Image (cartoon, helix red, strand yellow):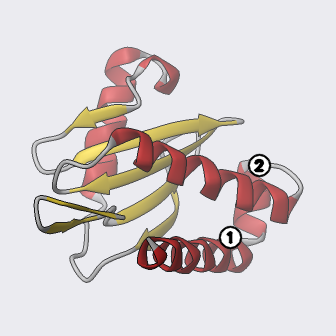
Amino acid sequence: LTESQGHRVMLQCIFILSDSGEVMLEKQLTGHRVDRSICDWFWDQVIAQGDSSQLPPVMASPTHYIFHLVRDGIIFLACAQVEMPPLMAIEFLCRAADVISDYLGGLNEDLIKDNFVIVYESSRCYSVICAMEDNRK
């Protein structure tokens, strides 16, 4: 999403999880695939805290930096292997959640599952828009 010390820094993957930790959507953003086991690591942290809202929005797993936000019980999770500005990642997740919520008229597990193709395509379109904005700067 931005340049840092001569290296391209970006989110590698977005996951959308239900309030029970089920991966409802996975969107790989780069050629380096992030394994879903990162969601298991995140969910272990949720269980340890008792609630996803008790976790800090930015965490370091053994392999990735994890950014997350919760909207209406839906967890938006993003991963990066290198450090990046945390607010940039959180803003990206907020905007992705807004786009999906606007498309579906709200956010809940049933809406996302029933409209999987729309949600997947909106996240893809949003990624393209962000890339266009980055290249413009």
Q: Residues within 10 Å of mark 2 (few under 14, many from 20)?
A: some
Q: Is residue 87 left or right of residue 60?
A: right
Q: Residue at coordinates 26% horizontally, 56% vertically from top-left?
A: 80
Report which residue position mark 1 lands on. 119
Quadrant location, the N terminus: bottom left
Q: Nearer the viewer, residue 33 or 125?
A: 125
Determine the CA span between mark 2 and mark 1.
11 Å
Determine the secondary structure under disc 1. helix
Can residue 83 be seen? Answer: yes
Tell me residue 137's x, y (percent): 43, 70
Q: With respect to residue 47, does 132 lie above or below? A: below
Report which residue position mark 2 lands on. 107
Tell me residue 39's x, y (percent): 34, 49
Q: Are the residues at dot 2 and dot 1 in contact (C-beta closer than 8 Å)?
A: no
The quarter holding residue 118 reads: bottom right
| Label ID, residue 72 | none
Amino acid tagged 1: Val
Determine the secondary structure under disc 2. loop
Can residue 17 be seen? Answer: no
Q: Is residue 29 left or right of residue 102?
A: left
